[in-house]
Amino acid sequence: MTSTRINPETLYPSVQYGFSHATLDEATGTVHLSGQVAWDKEYNVVGGSDVGLQARQALANIKAVLHAVGVGPEAVLRLRTFIVDYDVSMLGAIGPELAAFYGDAMPASNTVVGVQALAMPDFLIEIEAIATVK
């Protein structure tokens, strides 16, 4: 199996933390994206304590990875969203960000999972994605 690691220069360097932003399976055209958080390129948490703003940055990071493989949000097959101390009211902040991310494209499936914590204490949300380039 041939695969390509994807690490866009527009995103924070991740390899030092032991992961690539995505892996493209050349045989199937499937792109497996690592969970994206609200870090900008300089490791600043964007959005502070606002889960909606953190979602916006995580989704912008996903778009950057998708762009690096030549596709957009319409190529997303699945999302998995992890939210710290999840409460259903948080969907009101996240929903509009997902709508803006997809634009006119039909949203992919998404599972929301409440978690106790993420990799860094300031992260409120992490979004994984699977996409296709075929």
Image: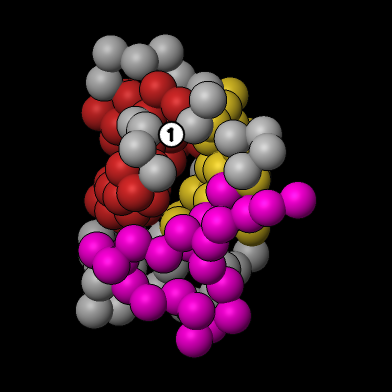
Q: Residue at x 40, y 44 (%)?
A: 69
Give x and y (percent) for residue 67: 31, 43
Q: Residue at x 64, y 45 (%)?
A: 25
Can residue 65 be seen here? The reply is yes
Q: Residue at x 42, y 13 (%)?
A: 106
Q: Which residue is nearer to you in this view: 56 or 7? A: 7
Specify the quadrant of the image occupied by residue 14.
bottom left
Classify 10 Å Cα crowding around label 1: few (below 14), some (14-19), many (20 and above). some
Magenta-colored stretch includes residue 114: no
Q: In the image, is 100 to the left or to the right of 125?
A: left
Q: Which residue is mark 1?
A: 91
Specify the quadrant of the image occupied by residue 31.
top right
Q: In the image, is 100 to the left or to the right of 111?
A: left
* Amino acid type, label 1: Leu
Question: Could you tell me how many numbered marks the image carries?
Answer: 1
Secondary structure found at label 1: helix
Is 26 rendered above or below residue 57?
Answer: above
Q: In the image, is 66 to the left or to the right of 17?
A: left
Give x and y (percent) for residue 133: 49, 31
Q: Which residue is nearer to you in this view: 126 or 42? A: 42
Which contiguous range is marked in magenta? 1-24
Give x and y (percent) for residue 123: 43, 67
Q: What's the image's color scheme?
A: secondary structure
Is 56 rendered above or below residue 12?
Answer: above
Q: Which residue is nearer to you in this view: 23 or 45? A: 23
Q: Residue at x 46, y 59 (%)?
A: 6
Can residue 51 be seen here? The reply is no
Residue that extends furthest to the bottom in the rendered view of this protein:
16
Magenta-colored stretch includes residue 15: yes
Give x and y (percent) for residue 51: 35, 52
Is 50 rendered above or below residue 11?
Answer: above
